[in-house]
Image (cartoon, rainbow, N blue to C red):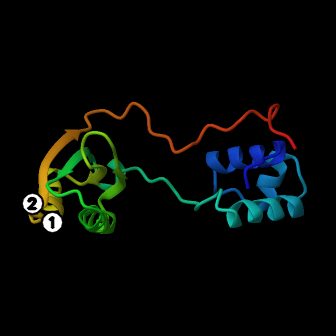
Amino acid sequence: MNEFDAIDIRLLDALQADASLSNQDLAARVAVSPATCLRRVKRLVEAGVVERRVAILSPDKLGAGLSAILEITLDRQGAEHLDAFEARAVQEAAVQQCWRVSPGPDFVLVVQVADMLAYHALTQRLLTQDANVRNIKAFFGVKRAKFDTRIGLPSTDSAGR
């Protein structure tokens, strides 16, 4: 599914802004019937365009106020070593994002933990005990100027079939 018409674009934009909207409210916002809305959203979900619908929580209000971006370089970069590290990283609840990157480090992780003590425990579990981790470079967030999950969509003027 690579072609989106103006209704698809409006639906995707509305869902990115607020995925908690009822089908009735979403249909009204996009100016289609509830049946059309339901059918189109179902098609977008089945096609994998909408991967999942989530609530974005406030880390500060939940006691998870320490954000870190980690650059991880492995000692051995064979496919089995990369796969093994990745599998361990994605199992960690504190790891919000795990990226294999190139060039530079092998992985970039975005982690969210309560405090430095929790960060230390995470690094002990995930990084220090792994003999294949050669280098870790950590960047700690001091101020979040922007956080968004939205993907830029074409304007509804340019979308069409």
Q: Is residue 141 left or right of residue 145?
A: left
Amino acid type indicated by mark 1: Arg
Residue 60 lies, in percent from the top left, at 33, 48
- The residue located at (80%, 32%) in the rendering is 158
Query: For the view shown, which residue lies furthest in the front direction?
Result: 78
Q: Which residue is mark 1?
A: 125
Quarter holding residue 156: top right
**Residue under the image location 31 percent in, 32 percent down:** 143
Q: Name the residue tied to disc 2.
A: 128
Q: Nearer the viewer, residue 53 or 159?
A: 159
User: Is residue 141 positioned above or below 1 on the image?
Assistant: above
Q: Position of residue 70 (x, y in %)?
A: 23, 46
Mark 1 closeness class: few <14, some 14–19, many ≥20 residues within 10 Å: some
Residue 117 in view in this figure: no
SS for callout 2: helix
Disc 2 residue type? Thr
Q: Is residue 77 above or below residue 154?
A: below
Q: CA distance from mark 1 to mark 2?
A: 7 Å
Task: Confirm or deny contact between disc 1 and disc 2 (CB under 8 A).
Answer: yes
Rendering coords of residue 3 (x, y %) = 78, 48
